[in-house]
Image: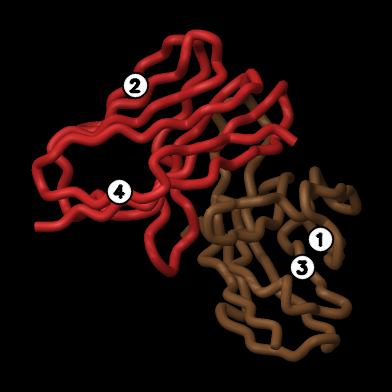
Chain colours: A red, B brown
Amino acid sequence: TQLLEQSPQFLSIQEGENLTVYCNSSSVFSSLQWYRQEPGEGPVLLVTVVTGGEVKKLKRLTFQFGDARKDSSLHITAAQPGDTGLYLCAGRTGGGNKLTFGTGTQLKVEL
Amino acid sequence: EAQVTQNPRYLITVTGKKLTVTCSQNMNHEYMSWYRQDPGLGLRQIYYSMNVEVTDKGDVPEGYKVSRKEKRNFPLILESPSPNQTSLYFCASSSPGPVRETQYFGPGTRLLVL
C-alpha cells in the first residue's frame, strides 16, 4: 500500500496569513487530487494534477505536482476563515480508479 | 440533484450485533467504494466495486462485507461489529474515465460500537 504523508497535521493561523501544506510519498502517482472536507460532510474535490511540475491555481489556492510525481503542495494566499477545514491529498496509480488518501491536514483560520 | 446518500448518518450499536449501512447514488456511476476515516490516518479504502456483481477488497477489508446487486446501491455489512470498527464511514462513486475523474462522496455515517 502506498503511503501519502501530509504535513503539517494541524495548522492554526490568523486571517490574511499564507500557508503551505505538503503531501509526500515514495511512490509515483499518475495523478494527484486535493480534497477539502468540512465537518459533517464528505470530501469535495478541489483539483486534479496530472503532469510532473504542473501548477494549477484556484483563486487563492495554488497546487503543484512534483516533477517526479511523488509529491504535491497546496499553497493558500491570504487565508480566510472560510478556508477552515480538513485538506486531503489523494494519489492514483496507473489507470485505475483506486485512490490512496493522505493523512490529512486540519486547517483553522481565525479572525 | 446528483448525490450519494448514506443511511443511517449516526449509529450506536453493541459488539456482535449485525448491521448494514446503505449507500445509493443517482449518477449512474459504475464505480463505488467504501472508506473509513480515523484521526491521523486519512481515508482508507475498505471495499470497492467496478460494476454490478464485481467487488474487490481495498486496504482494510477485515470484518466487512459488501454487495453490488444493483448499479445504484452498494451496502456495507458488518456481520459482527467490534469496537475497533468505531469510525466515520464514507461511500463514494465515480465513472471510469481519464485520470481527472471525480469521486463523489456521501455525507458519512458515524458508527460507535460499544
| Quarter occupied by residue B113 | bottom right
| Residue corresponding to mark 1 | B70
Q: CA distance from mark 2 to mark 1?
A: 38 Å
| Residue corresponding to mark 4 | A11
Counting other residues with Cα less than 10 Å from the Cα at mark 1, is it few (<14), some (14-19), or many (20 or more)?
A: few
| Residue corresponding to mark 3 | B75
For the residue pair A50 and B84, the one nearer the viewer reads as B84
Of tags 3 and 4, which is closer to the observer? 4
> x and y percent of residue B29 in the render?
67, 47
Residue type at the position of mark 1: Glu
On the rendered image, what quadrant is the C terminus of chain A found in?
Answer: bottom left
Q: CA distance from mark 2 to mark 3?
A: 36 Å
- The residue at the far right in this view is B53
Q: In the image, B92: left or right of A36?
A: right
Residue type at the position of mark 4: Leu
Q: CA distance from mark 2 to mark 4?
A: 22 Å
- Give the structural element (helix, strand or loop) at label 3: loop
Q: In the image, B99: left or right of A73?
A: right
Q: Determine if marks 4 and 1 fall on one subunit.
A: no
Q: In the image, A9: left or right of B80?
A: left
Residue type at the position of mark 2: Lys
Q: Do residues under tags 2 and 3 come within 8 Å of each other at their CB atoms?
A: no
| Residue corresponding to mark 2 | A56
For the residue pair A27 and B21, the one nearer the viewer reads as A27
- Give the structural element (helix, strand or loop) at label 1: loop
Chain letter for mark 3: B
Counting other residues with Cα less than 10 Å from the Cα at mark 3, is it few (<14), some (14-19), or many (20 or more)?
A: many
Q: Do residues under tags 4 and 1 come within 8 Å of each other at their CB atoms?
A: no
Chain letter for mark 1: B
Chain letter for mark 4: A
- Give the structural element (helix, strand or loop) at label 2: strand
Chain letter for mark 2: A
